[in-house]
Image (spheres, rainbow, N blue to C red):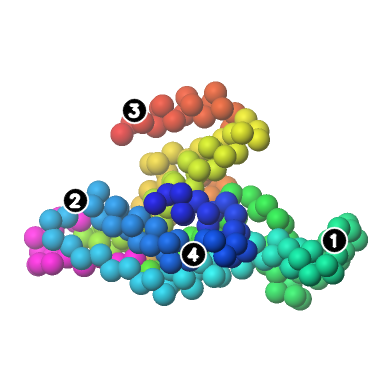
Amino acid sequence: MAQMIDIVWLSDDVILDENYHIDEIIESFANMAYAVAKNLKFNKVYVYVNKWSIFAALQRYSRDIFGFSRLRHCLEKNGICDDISENIINEVKHEHKGIGLRIVSEDPYIHKRIAFFLYYFSIMKPFTINFDGSMDKLNEKQVEQIIHFNSIVLLSCVQTFLLSYNRINSKKESVYAFINPNNLYDKSLIHDLTYRTLNRSSIEAAMRYMISLIPENEYNKLLEKSRKKK
């Protein structure tokens, strides 16, 4: 499940390589929602996954995150430019808003990737959960979990991404991304993702505050400390 979601986070192969099937990616997100619902331990719930909304959110996310690398790939594939010069890159960066590119980078920072993911998926809200029975039988926490189910699923996806990022990035450099789970599932963040129409910049600012890029030894200490608090 997580491996297919990793493709979305870490590369644009899902778009550029026909061997990857978008249906498998969407199904992976659906399975994540089912797993989250199971962990919430409701007796009678129905999880509804709007796969069209997932596809629409993924299209917008990948367009923004991988738009620049797609442009380079298209130019090189068609022989327009086998080795794109620095002058051309600078020209594209200067005119990027005029040609519809939100991000001029082939490898956007993880904070920006997460921000754009949360932005589009919080707008589309593809995950909902319905309780089969009277809501009066539920306690306050359970009611909030139902209301904020989409946001909880999205933050669970963020956790899988950070684990994947650390696993892959650690091979290139000894810097790890750390976020305390208690901060990730902060009530105010969950509330804002559910009710407010946040912009990308505000979400990215929140992620930069919550996610630290730290050395491996410090990362292991913080990870162990956060586990003891659970």
Q: Which residue is mark 3?
A: 228
Where's residue 163, x and y in %? Answer: 48, 41
Disc nearer the start of the sequence (3/2): 2
Asked whether 168 falls inside the magenta stretch, the response is no
Quarter of the image for residue 95 reads bottom right
Question: Residue 21's mark?
Answer: 4
Disc nearer the start of the sequence (4/2): 4
- Amino acid type, mark 1: Asp
Q: Is residue 197 visible to the viewer in this orientation of the structure?
A: no
Cα–Cα span, label 3 and label 2: 22 Å
Mark 1 vs mark 2: in front: 1
Cα–Cα span, label 4 and label 1: 28 Å
> Of residues 73 and 187, which is closer to you in this image?
73
Question: Which quarter of the rendered picture does the C terminus lie within?
Answer: top left
Disc nearer the start of the sequence (4/1): 4
Mark 4 vs mark 2: in front: 4
Q: Which residue is mark 2?
A: 41
Whether the residues at callouts 3 and 2 have beta carbons within 8 Å, the answer is no
> Of residues 160 and 184, which is closer to you in this image?
160
Whether the residues at callouts 4 and 3 have beta carbons within 8 Å, the answer is no
Question: Residue 82's mark?
Answer: 1
- Amino acid type, mark 3: Lys
What residue is shown at x 46% (from left), y 54% (from top)? 4
Region of the chain picked out in magenta, as a range: 127-142
- Amino acid type, mark 2: Lys
Whether the residues at callouts 4 and 2 have beta carbons within 8 Å, the answer is no
Whether the residues at callouts 4 and 1 have beta carbons within 8 Å, the answer is no
- Amino acid type, mark 4: His
